[in-house]
Amino acid sequence: MRVRLRRFSLTKAVPLAISRGTTAAVEHLLVEIEHDGLIGRGETGGFDTGLRAYETDALAAELAALVPELEPLAPEPLQALDPLLARLSPPARCGLDLALHDWWGQRLEQPLHRLWGLDPGACVATSVTLGLGEPAAVLARLERWWQLLPASRIKLKLGSPAGSDHDRALVQAVTEALARRQDQHPGTLELQVDANGGWDLATAQAMLPWLADQGVVLVEQPLAAQADPLADRAGFAALAGQAPLALVADESCWNLADLLRLAPVVDGINIKLLKSGGLSEALLMARCARGLGLGVMLGCYSDSSLLNSAAAQLLPLVEWPDLDSHLNLVDDPFQGAVLEGDCLRPTPLPGLGVRWTPRPGDAAAQVDAAGPKVAGSKVTRAKTTPTKAAPAKTVGSKAAGGRRSPSRPSKDNSTAKAQAKGPEA
């Protein structure tokens, strides 16, 4: 099989601020494999979770180094390539894993979700993200989302460097806006929050019951991920059961081993393809999580329609979709998953169901055993700056109640609590 890498830039219409910084643009990598007249495509790119970070240049070097071993092989059976993919970092593996799955689906002339026996009719509304900022700016971003789609599920970034008073002001401003929206447009609205590890334990313990009182349905990654797996699990154990809302692990959960480690002390996990290493691990994690009674979130970084359309193949297994990054791009070179209202669904096209329209400014790297040969224009580098937010006064009152997450298999909380008190905690 022939392997090619192509760099491309992605620019956000609205920069996204979280507890670790602000991102306006990124550089990603298109991974292509060609065999028997079919081209499979995947996407990868650098990202930073605070504890672990990857650069796009390093991912390109990883993949280029593997090309001499890949090119003499065929892209099927997929299992035969597992030993080679296992040597790659998760995001590098993701790019190749997606390209292989795309090729495989095209070979069989079926979309992946159909090959896995999944029902696109089971997909539910995706959340849209509000980054950190002053309340007025966050509300303006919310109105911009509502101009684009119904946006019945809102994810609000918290963990502000300005402190928990600023977080509370944001929550109250957004819940008031949701209450007004519900009066004008009857229907279920849902507020989720994501601290991106921006709280310490004392802050998280104070915030969780308060957030539940505001009608928030879940809290994602309240504490920073820890390098020590036992210490990381202990943090979630200290918060488990403190409030009637779902506790979801993101930066702490990369693969199936992490899922099993955290299952007794969380209510859900956030699967991202760049973290999991692609669809192979992500599918396994989603099915296992559901079997354990955990909710599944499916998230993204600053990803294009290619990565999000690949993730969309798993949406029938997902309670909390969070695939909105491509909706905030001004230069997305791909077309894929279909948005119906605020529900994202995979297309019936084979493989990942993605079409690519190259842009004149994209740099292309032909990768072969002799190494990359780069041609084209310079690509914009990722732009990330520290988040800055000024303290704000607490405003408003909580929104109308009644926002609830869809039901999922029940989890034995008594068992979870008992396990949470074990040696790992």
Image (cartoon, grey):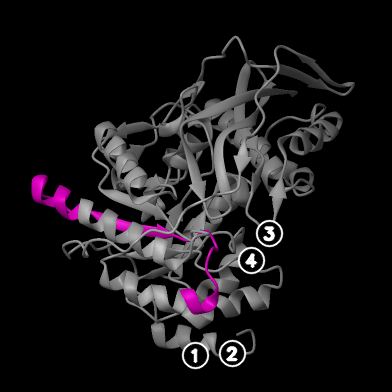
Q: Could you tell whether 346 is left or right of 280 in the image?
A: left
| Alpha-carbon span between mark 3 and mark 4 | 18 Å
Q: Residues within 10 Å of mark 3 (few under 14, many from 20)?
A: few
Q: Disc 3 marks which residue?
A: 51
Q: In front of the other: label 2 or label 4? A: 2
**Contact between labelled residues 1 and 3, with CB atoms less than 8 Å apart:** no
**Contact between labelled residues 4 and 3, with CB atoms less than 8 Å apart:** no
Q: In front of the other: label 3 or label 1? A: 3
Q: Disc 2 marks which residue?
A: 422
Q: Could you tell whether 338 is left or right of 196 in the image?
A: left
Q: Secondary structure at mark 4?
A: helix
Q: Secondary structure at mark 2?
A: loop
Give the residue type that dot 1 points to.
Answer: Ala
**Residue 418 marker:** 1
Marks 1 and 4, the one that precedes in the sequence? 4
Give the residue type that dot 3 points to.
Answer: Leu
Q: In front of the other: label 3 or label 4? A: 3
